[in-house]
Amino acid sequence: MTAITNIPTRKYDGYVWLSDQKEPETLIQKEFSFEDTKANPFIIEALLWNAEEEISIMVRHTGKYHIQEFKLNELPTGHELVEKVYLPHRLGDKVKHVYFQQLWIPEPDAFCAGMEVMTMKALIFTGFHSLTEKH
């Protein structure tokens, strides 16, 4: 994905942090549109998870937007996902835990006689455990 305005409007769990705000806007099963994104205030960071389509979108702004999209149902053959759970910071009272998946992919390694070793390729945001969920 090359432009922030190309991110589809969907219901997301996650957050969007604008440059003129002290804290991000937390989204819990809330539709969000990037169509009206302006140059200022710009989006510093966004982590979005759509559970229905198993799509994770991660946005970072470092002078320009860097957008990564992961479709969990289209990951490479032989991949492994390892769940990581973190405590939230500045995400409000409704978020109890933040979930990520480490994406590990087998690759040949010159230091292991060319045998394949698992290499971590990405840390993928996969939503929240909110206080409104029943677990």
Image (cartoon, grey):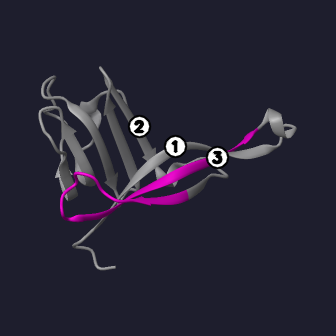
Front: mark 1 or 2: 1
* Element class at badge 1: strand
> Mark 3 — residue?
105
Looking at the picture, tell me which residue is in the foreground, 11 or 124: 124
Main secondary structure found in the magenta portion? strand
- Total numbered badges shown on the rendered structure: 3
Outermost right residue: 113
Task: Measure the C-alpha gap from mark 2 to mark 3.
Answer: 17 Å
Report the span colored magenta: 82-108
Instruction: Give the percent coordinates (x, y) of residue 45.
Output: 28, 37
What residue is at 27 percent from the left and 52 percent from the top? 89
Task: Measure the C-alpha gap from mark 1 to mark 2.
Answer: 10 Å
Residue 89 lies left or right of residue 19; in this view the side is right
* Element class at badge 3: strand
> Mark 1 — residue?
122
Check the picture and name the quadrant holding the N terminus: top left
> Mark 2 — residue?
68
Q: In the image, is residue 112 part of the stretch drawn in magenta?
A: no
Q: Is residue 79 above or below residue 43?
A: below
Instruction: Give the percent coordinates (x, y) of residue 17.
Output: 21, 40
